[in-house]
Amino acid sequence: MNELLKKSALELADMLAAGQITSVELTQACLDRIHAVNPRVNAFLLIDDDGALATARDIDERRARGEKLGRLAGVPIALKDNMVTRGKDTTCGSKILEGWKPPYDATVTLKVAEAGMPVVGKTNMDEFAMGSSTEHSAYGPTGNPWDLDRIPGGSGGGSAAAVGSFMVPLALGSDTGGSIRQPGAVTGTVGVKPTYGAVSRYGLVAMASSLDQIGPVARTVADAAALQEVVGGHDPFDSTSLDEPVAELEKLTAQAAGKPLAGTRVGVVTELQGEGYQKGVLDSFNASVEVLKGLGAEIVEVSCPSFDYALAAYYLIMPAEASSNLARFDGMRYGIRVEPESGHVTAETVMAATREAGFGDEVKRRIILGTHVLSAGYYDAYYGSAQKVRTLVQRDFTAAFEKCDVLVSPTAPTTAFKFGDKIDDPMAMYLNDIATIPANLAGVPGLSLPCGLAAEDGLPVGFQILAPAREDARMYQIAGALEAGIGEPIALSCPASEWEEQA
Ligand code: GLN
């Protein structure tokens, strides 16, 4: 493997700025790696050699002319395939959108372009971001770079596996219930769900609009911070976008690394540990809590009793919103159109035939559940109750953040499981997000960083840090301090770096 690919995005940015490498050279190295290993990982649904190299050439020329460029100019990135890219396939991992070329760019797509970052491709995902393993992708699952027989998490397994297997230093994901953080945890990468509204959702194909949030996927905390600075900020095209400037996340993260955490109160959430959590996960998590203590942080135990009901509330609110959002895929406006095999061809029968053929089982399951909980007779009992639980979860966070600066937990209850283990048991699959979902219900930021390998299987474990809304900087600072305290860069020990490459 080309040694450049092991470097962090910020190291590469420094090398580009110093003229030690060109963006064309770096982008080509990523593309070569992608062509050599993607056939066995299936992290990419679209590889855009021409588009990426055109951006790289443009940046190299502008740099040569002495233009002032952004921090990450010339550093390649991958986008999850639910972020629209003008004229380039965007499938959301679904057959229903096969061949659809969006007529516009998402705000993040434009921001990445303005920052001069070559987009090497679009990454695999569970269909419409519904899942925790990528096994619900219509284009086949993605392999975990630590063990190709295991899941890379989901729904953003493609982005996490692409970064984890050194195909690209950075990617973007979307997190509705954990789809950036849980893949980060099981692939030994860093995944961040910013505060709701911190990054524009314009052009992100909606799953559950009140929960969806775009965020960075990286191998280091500082890389993620730098990427959030690029994609964050107010967007008049997204009415839920926060109207405030983005903090200097990279600088603050760098300053925190290696500094003591005296005066920082860290709350360990009682409800997010214990039963159902793998021993090796808890051991690595507890060892990292000791690292925080060693850095001078004060560790307190905090109870958030409503978190026990968060998963149930999520699986009512999310399908309700998804059923409404996915109504637009009707065979008239986007993607494939299927005519009924028999009977009359009417708008209604074409819509039904298209949705029958185009959506996978998990998507259909959630649409049915969502329309049911929104139906007149059941609305109060299900959707209404779930919204009340959502308020209780928010109150638990507010109370907890009065006692401590951040909350911590394992990101996922287990390490990466084997393909097929949970696919026939939706409940078992859903339980993987037990620790990540509360943050989405409350809109607070959450970050997962690798904190060790589980003793029983040698697979990566994720450590989750949750901060109050708008305090993304605090979350990054503590993550940066912990990362430095843990010392050994877990992402770099991924066996993917030893893979033989066949073009
Ligand atoms: N795994 C969760 C689900 O299936 C979360 C998905 C996501 O965050 N997009 O809903």
Image (cartoon, helix red, strand yellow):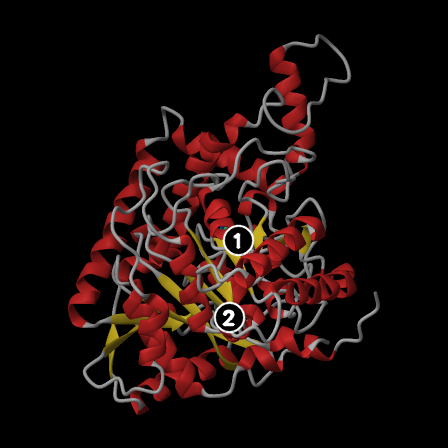
Q: In this figure, which residue is indicated by the disc labeled 1?
A: 427
Can you see residue 457? no
Amino acid of disc 1: Met
Amino acid of disc 2: Ala
Can you see residue 326? yes
Give the Cα distance between marks 2 and 1.
49 Å
If the image is split into quadrants, where does the C terminus sit? bottom right
Q: Is mark 2 within 8 Å of ligand 1?
A: no
Residue lying at 28% horizontally and 65% vertically, measured from the top left: 467
2 vs 1, front mark: 2
Front residue of this view, candidates 430 and 337 = 337
Is residue 416 shown left or right of residue 473? right
Which secondary structure lies at badge 1? helix
| Residue 412 in the image: above or below residue 345 | below
Residue lying at 51% horizontally and 87% vertically, measured from the top left: 488
Mark 1, residues whose alpha carbon is within 10 Å: few (<14), some, or many (≥20)?
Answer: few
Mark 2, residues whose alpha carbon is within 10 Å: few (<14), some, or many (≥20)?
Answer: some
Which secondary structure lies at badge 2? helix
Which mark identifies residue 17?
Answer: 2
Residue lying at 68% horizontally and 50% vertically, measured from the top left: 48
Front residue of this view, candidates 82 and 354 = 82
Residue 304 drawn at (x, y percent)? 26, 64
If the image is split into quadrants, where does the N terminus sit? bottom right
Which mark identifies residue 55?
Answer: none
Is residue 167 shown left or right of residue 501? left
